[in-house]
Image (cartoon, rainbow, N blue to C red):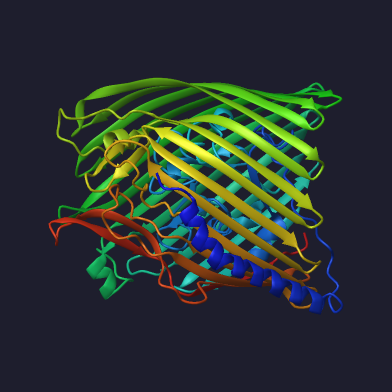
């Protein structure tokens, strides 16, 4: 097996000078402006989202954490959640169109199957569809509504359940407060965005409503997108807590340009493979919940969600356009009890809960009709126990059961069932030898159920269908977090081993179970507030993702970069506004589905983004330029059958060249 050492050497030789330069420039800017500028001093972000699946009872899990607060989000000039996450160590993004509308988030060394091994949540509620491959729709989240984003790197299958394999991202929205906001955006590729939001409180009631319209032609031909979103939340504060109801809906039209093979890409990287493929979706979400205090020690929290997706589209099959229709409905109920008991060494925190998911799926295409019903039920409990005032212990367990009824007019026309269950455990220690130093050691078991489409998407002859096994894994990790004055340094090292990892094989048009896979990696993060005006952020992620057995033993898992680096500098001026610059690099990797590593590696990708923001009373102006140096980067690459060659070839999705976005917002006094 390859070691991490070969990956470290070129990275350190190339990027330690870059980090040193960033620190030097930041220090120089700080020194030259401290006397001239008077800017309020800032504190570095502190973790506050808990290991209890609740923002009301804060407690940290013994694991690698990153918190991106509201100020950092504003300084970045980012216009989407994807742009915010791109600067984080250990996260590898795939943005097919470069506009944030089709983004998958990979954590801890996942490539083509990243979206199904990273759990995305909003205020502790799942955005991932638990039982089908529909990925979390990050494009539906407006960054103005975000208070912070907490990232738990590494496995968290016991507490958060299915798909929390590579990590968990929890997007924390702002609490309802009286405000109004009007926002207009315009930029490259005829990008237009219009948004209005209003929120208010009266007695014990509160409400927030927002509406948004986005239009863009995007970088490639036949890549137009048109999105309309409305969101309404109503809540009431009680003597013992709060109850709330949310209704959200969006309509999204997206033209699909498809992948270009090498000769097509060389001729025109903006070209579309065809001019008929599209998706036209209607998405409706209904959520409700309550947070109720049960005395001084216990709290009851419950979330109830119903999601309905109706998606019409067209895709070229066998040389001609073919109509498709997808219908999904998923309901979930997630009650949990959280208890806290004080002792001299610290608080004992107990979290226990029940997760229930029920999903129906229908797909009509040229390949026939696919239908499925799935039910998943889980019971879990976790204990955080302070052994000493400097040492705490974490233990947890989860039992999950899946029941499925599947029917496919091509693969299994008579129908089939798929029932399975898992028991997963977790243990961890956190030690604080000093107030500003935390070390952790953790073992967590994870799992992922095969999704509805992964069963029915198997392109096999009738009678030759082989059921997929459900994925299981074990993660071991250790790390340290040191806070010194205005600097935070974090380091973690991990090993993640999976059995029956599920992935799509583009060369056989089917989902398969891989032989045992293994990921060994390390993440390093440095955040430093050099002065009241200047901050720097350095993130480095290394991973050696390989097959541990089978015919591809010691081969690299495709579409996983061995290194990801980001360097960011923020500068704030009381008169000129705030400036942000970030440099991102994703290392070389093999194309998706290239399991035997037979094609050439995709070259490393790097990008420089800059942003400026100025606030004058109730008006703010923001400008952001992505890919300032105009690099010809790739969003995605996969091995697929090329009819022109009568064999497999690499298909490419081109990332946008230099592009800009200007945002003007106004907050009227209400």
- Answer whether residue 127 is visible to the viewer in this image: no
In this orientation, which residue lies closer to the viewer: 160 or 28?
28
- Identify the residue at image location x=80%, y=74%: 574
- Identify the residue at image location x=80%, y=67%: 531
Q: How many marks?
A: 0
In this orientation, which residue lies closer to the viewer: 614 or 549?
549
- Answer whether residue 565 is visible to the viewer in this image: yes
Question: Which quadrant holds the N terminus?
Answer: top left
In the rendered image, the vertical position of residue 319 relative to residue 241, given as above or below: below
- Identify the residue at image location x=73%, y=74%: 577
In the rendered image, the vertical position of residue 512 relative to residue 483, given as above or below: above
Taking 151 as reference, is 658 left or right? left
Taking 398 as reference, is 102 left or right? left
User: Image quadrant of residue 508?
Assistant: top left
Taking 205 as reference, is 569 left or right? left
Q: Position of residue 654 (x, y in %)?
A: 37, 66
User: Image quadrant of residue 411?
Assistant: top left
User: Image quadrant of residue 75?
Assistant: bottom right
- Identify the residue at image location x=54%, y=50%: 90
Q: Position of residue 208 (x, y in %)?
A: 67, 48
Question: Which quadrant holds the C terminus?
Answer: bottom right
Q: Position of residue 375 (x, y in %)?
A: 42, 24
In this orientation, which residue lies closer to the viewer: 66 or 611?
66
In the rendered image, the vertical position of residue 659 relative to residue 58, given as above or below: below
Q: Position of residue 484 (x, y in %)?
A: 79, 53
């Amino acid at each position: 097996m390859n070691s991490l050492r070969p990956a470290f050497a070129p990275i350190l030789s190339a990027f330690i000078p870059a980090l040193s330069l960033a620190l030097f420039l930041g220090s120089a800017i700080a020194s030259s402006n401290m006397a001239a500028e008077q800017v309020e001093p800032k504190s570095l972000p502190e973790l506050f989202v808990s290991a209890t699946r609740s923002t009301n009872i804060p407690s940290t899990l013994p694991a690698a954490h990153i918190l991106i607060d509201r100020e950092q989000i504003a300084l970045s000039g980012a216009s989407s959640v994807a742009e915010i996450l791109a600067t984080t160590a250990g996260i590898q993004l795939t943005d097919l169109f470069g506009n944030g509308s089709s983004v998958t988030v990979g954590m801890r060394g996942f490539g083509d199957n990243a979206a199904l091994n990273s759990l995305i949540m909003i205020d502790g509620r799942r955005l991932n569809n638990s039982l089908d491959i529909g990925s979390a729709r990050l494009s539906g989240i407006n960054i103005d509504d975000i208070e912070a984003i907490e990232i738990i790197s590494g496995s968290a299958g016991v507490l958060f359940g299915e798909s929390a394999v590579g990590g968990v991202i929890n997007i924390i929205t702002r609490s309802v407060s009286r405000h109004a906001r009007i926002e207009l955006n315009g930029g490259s590729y005829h990008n237009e965005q219009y948004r209005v939001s209003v929120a208010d409180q009266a007695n014990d009631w509160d409400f927030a409503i927002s509406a948004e319209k986005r239009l863009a032609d995007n970088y490639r031909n036949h890549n137009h997108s048109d999105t309309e979103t409305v969101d309404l939340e109503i809540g009431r504060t009680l003597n013992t807590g709060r109850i709330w109801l949310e209704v959200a809906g969006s309509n999204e039209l997206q033209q699909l340009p498809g992948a270009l093979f090498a000769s097509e890409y060389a001729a025109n990287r903006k070209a579309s493979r065809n001019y008929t493929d599209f998706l036209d979706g209607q998405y409706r979400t209904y959520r409700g919940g309550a947070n109720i205090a049960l005395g001084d020690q216990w709290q009851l929290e419950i979330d109830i969600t119903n999601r309905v997706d109706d998606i019409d589209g067209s895709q070229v099959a066998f040389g001609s356009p073919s109509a498709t229709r997808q219908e999904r409905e998923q309901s979930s109920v997630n009650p949990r009890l959280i208890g806290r008991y004080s002792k001299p060494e610290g608080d004992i925190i107990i979290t226990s809960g029940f997760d229930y998911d029920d999903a129906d799926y229908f797909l009509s295409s040229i390949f026939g009709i696919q239908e499925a019903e799935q039910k998943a039920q889980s019971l879990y409990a976790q204990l955080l126990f302070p052994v000493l005032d400097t040492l705490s212990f974490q233990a947890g367990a989860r039992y999950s059961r899946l029941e499925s009824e599947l029917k496919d007019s091509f693969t299994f026309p008579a129908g089939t069932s798929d029932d399975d269950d898992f028991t997963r455990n977790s243990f961890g220690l956190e030690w604080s030898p000093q107030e500003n130093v935390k070390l952790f050691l953790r073992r967590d078991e994870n799992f992922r159920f095969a999704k509805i489409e992964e069963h029915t998407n198997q392109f096999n002859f009738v009678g030759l269908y082989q059921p997929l096994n459900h994925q299981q894994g074990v993660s071991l990790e250790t790390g340290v977090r040191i806070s010194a004055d205005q600097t935070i340094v974090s380091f973690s090292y991990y090993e993640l081993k999976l059995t029956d990892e599920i992935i799509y094989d583009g060369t056989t048009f089917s989902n398969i179970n891989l032989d045992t896979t293994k990921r060994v990696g390390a993440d390093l993060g440095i955040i430093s507030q050099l002065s009241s005006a200047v901050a720097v952020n350095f993130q480095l992620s290394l991973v050696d993702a390989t097959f541990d057995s089978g015919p591809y033993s010691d081969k690299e898992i495709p579409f996983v970069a061995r290194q990801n680096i980001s360097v960011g500098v923020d500068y704030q001026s009381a008169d000129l506004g705030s400036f942000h610059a970030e440099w991102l690099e994703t290392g070389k990797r093999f194309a998706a589905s290239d399991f035997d590593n037979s094609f050439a590696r995709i070259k490393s990708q790097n990008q420089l983004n800059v942003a400026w923001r100025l606030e004058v009373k109730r008006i703010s102006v923001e400008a952001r330029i992505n890919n300032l140096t105009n690099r010809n980067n790739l969003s995605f690459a996969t091995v697929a059958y090329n009819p022109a060659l009568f064999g497999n070839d690499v298909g490419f999705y081109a990332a946008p060249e230099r592009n800009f976005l200007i945002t003007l917002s106004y907050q009227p006094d209400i």
